[in-house]
Image: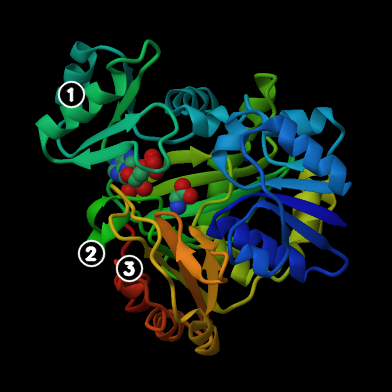
Amino acid sequence: MKILVIGSGAREHALVHSLAKDEGTEIFCAPGNAGIAREVTTFPLVATDSGQAVSLATQLAVDLVVIGPEAPLVAGVADALREAGFAVFGPSGEAAQLEGSKAFAKDVMIAAGVPTALSYTCQTETQVRDALTEFGAPYVVKDDGLAAGKGVVVTGDFEEALAHGLACISGRTDGAVVIEEYLAGPEVSLFGVTDGKTVRALSPAQDFKRALDNDGGPNTGGMGAYSPLDWAPENLVAETIERVLQPTIDEMTKRGTPFSGLLYAGLALTSNGIKVIEFNARFGDPETQVVLSRLKSPLSQLLLAAANGTLAELPELQWSDEAAITVVLAAQGYPQDPVAGAAISGLEEAHESGSFVYHAGTKATDSGDIVVSGGRVLCVTGTGTNLADAREKVYAGVNQIKFAGSHHRTDIALQASRGEIEVP
Ligand code: AMP
Ligand code: GLY
């Protein structure tokens, strides 16, 4: 089976790495990055350009296209590929609005009876002020549109909340901001693979959104992740399928915009039960790096079945009992103003120490050096018999890698490894 993966992050590196392990697969990636190019053939591509994607898929005569990031999905790249006759893993542009518009996602959740935070969608200063006053601190203020994980401000400071709310609506005719109640409780990322009818949940993971240790600093795209979640309630997956994933998928079908691909539920486990914090329309990054490390069933069969509408016939997914942890090494200045260009050393040594290094923002220079080219640079990933063991392995790898301005969190999976996470 020939498969083209679209995207250039560590998530796509993990997808490529897993797909390439399956028997009988030949994998291509566009545009990829320096790490992906070491494993498979890569091609230049503007990921949001439907015409280019169709040309490349045609030239390579692929059997399946897997779209990694949200931007091409929202831009309708999956639609163009399907119209050209390709099997595609990833939702249509209309269905990807579940991620592309937080107000749309709220509307679907309310219609489907999915538990989520109470919210208002605001378009004027008065509405923003009233909503903030009604919910009180801590304030949760979300840009309606795509913002690469940086459109959300959670703060106890009214003025900061107001300023972000106004920035989201000012100067844009269709600008909207979602203001919602604060949800207290541990967060879980749960991925549902769906063909628009059936859904298969993957093993849950936890992401670390804040830039600094102990959840300090600004929100980022994600600074690390681990799986499995030994502390999560036993019925979490079954309950999420029943109350969140299946009703959402059914509601999208009812609206005439069926969702097929990956429905990512970002959940808070609150004292009032599970609540959806956000939906994404694609695999999470960096959670994919740990979830796929533990998947024993062939990923290519799973994604093809979702693309072909045959998920109900697929055998149950098999998982490794091992724990997996990934730690993001970020560029100087990330997330505000990442600085590109620093030369990276120690990649071989990290591999030798027993961890696997997925590349995100890297590129190879003409002389063969690997340099920083994005905010999140590398995802060092380790597995072990338990989280404490996996932490030793992954940080042994992290400590081998050097580049100017590199920073990472040192507490990924620390609380969980000590049994300190409590579900209210
Ligand atoms: P989102 O992009 O919607 O996932 O938001 C980014 C991060 O902000 C989440 O992972 C949470 O840590 C935090 N967050 C978002 N919504 C809420 C909420 N209603 N209550 C508490 N924290 C939230
Ligand atoms: N790690 C969060 C996300 O992929 O949106």
Assign a secondary structure to mark 3: loop
Looking at the picture, which amino acid does disc 2 mark? Answer: Asn
Measuring from the top left, give residue 116's x and y in whole percent. Answer: 40, 35
Residue of label 3: 406
Say if residue 87 shows up in the picture: no
Measuring from the top left, give residue 262's x and y in whole percent. Answer: 63, 45
Looking at the picture, which amino acid does disc 3 mark? Answer: Ser
Q: Earlier in the sequence, mark 1 or mark 2?
A: 1
Q: Which mark's residue is nearer the viewer, 2 or 3?
A: 3
Q: Are marks 3 and 1 in contact (CB under 8 Å)?
A: no
Q: Residue at x 78, y 35 (%)?
A: 54
| Residue placed most toward the observer, 238 or 166 | 166
Disc 3 CB within 8 Å of nearest ligand 2 atom:
no
Mark 1 closeness class: few <14, some 14–19, many ≥20 residues within 10 Å: few
Q: Which mark's residue is nearer the viewer, 1 or 2?
A: 2
Assign a secondary structure to mark 2: helix
User: Which label is found at residue 162?
Assistant: none
**Distance from label 2 to label 3 (Cα)?**
18 Å
Q: Is residue 412 above or below residue 173?
A: below
Measuring from the top left, give residue 3's x and y in whole percent. Answer: 80, 53
Mark 2 closeness class: few <14, some 14–19, many ≥20 residues within 10 Å: few
**Distance from label 1 to label 2 (Cα)?**
29 Å
Q: Residue at x 32, y 23 (%)?
A: 177
Looking at the picture, which amino acid does disc 1 mark? Answer: Glu
Residue of label 2: 214
- Quarter of the image where one finds residue 86: top right
Mark 3 closeness class: few <14, some 14–19, many ≥20 residues within 10 Å: some
Residue of label 1: 134
| Residue placed most toward the observer, 152 or 323 | 152
Q: Earlier in the sequence, mark 2 or mark 3?
A: 2
Q: Residue at x 82, y 27 (%)?
A: 83
